[in-house]
Image (cartoon, grey):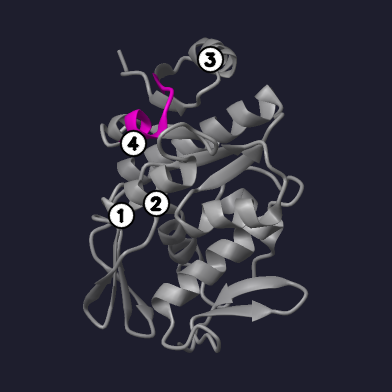
Amino acid sequence: MEQKKTVLVVEDEKSIVDILRFNLEKEGYAVATAYDGDTGLEKALENPDLILLDVMLPKRNGFDVCRALREKGSSVPVIILTAREEEADKVLGLEIGADDYITKPFSMRELMARVKANIRRTAMQRSGSADAAMAAGGGLTINPENYQVCKHNKPIDLTQREYELLTFLASHPGKVYSRTDLMEQVWNYGYVGDDVRTVDVTVRRLREKIEDDPASPALILTRRGVGYYFSAES
């Protein structure tokens, strides 16, 4: 029997935890829980398949948990749960390495769809492998076997989402993809609301890590009014 995927819920409101647990277990997931940031980080390092992470937590807030998790090298998918509508909060979550965010009050159907998409995407990556590293241009090499990206033979530390976005674009050099295309192909779910910002922030963070001059990119380029593409001439 296939082992159940585990979702870690880090949330201090027990009523929300109970609702999430009920719905996740109904969908066939195993559920672990934590009610404060310190415990959440401890359990996050036990490698669950996905983390639902509230922002406002006792002891250590969700942003600090996510930041610490990434600093320790974990690439587990993280979906930030936030009751705050400020754009800056959402962008901050992405900047520190979260894969996604959803704002309270959220549709349980929408949340479950995002959980499923993120776990499916991770499982597909782990099951797939390639025989050799791909030379992407601009001194970049991508090794699908160990998910390692190097620039001029020096490893680059990318989040899982950044890695996936780079790999997708580099696998289709010169082809322009709209933000909607990227939400469907890389994020694995359709365009929803202001997800356009998610794509833009991820592209910006990726450029900061792989471009010689992020302000004047040579690898991931913008076709104004259309979308993004990986330069075939890089």
Amino acid marked by disc 1: Glu
**Residue of label 2:** 67
Horizontal and vertical percent position of residue 192: 73, 45
What residue is disc 1 on?
71
Do tag 2 and tag 1 residues touch (Cβ < 8 Å)?
yes
Instruction: Residue 38: say if magenta.
Output: yes
Relative to residue 36, is residue 225 drawn left or right? right
Q: Position of residue 101 (x, y in %)?
A: 59, 43
- What amino acid does circle 3 point to? Lys
Q: Residue at x 37, y 31 (%)?
A: 40
Q: Residues within 10 Å of mark 1 (few under 14, many from 20)?
A: few
| Of pointers 4 and 3, the one earlier in the residue sequence | 3
Query: Would you name the residue on which mark 4 appears?
Result: 41
Tell me which label, 2 or 3, sits earlier in the chain: 3
User: What segment is highlighted magenta in the picture?
Assistant: 33-41
Whole-number angstrom distance, CA of label 2 to CA of label 1: 6 Å
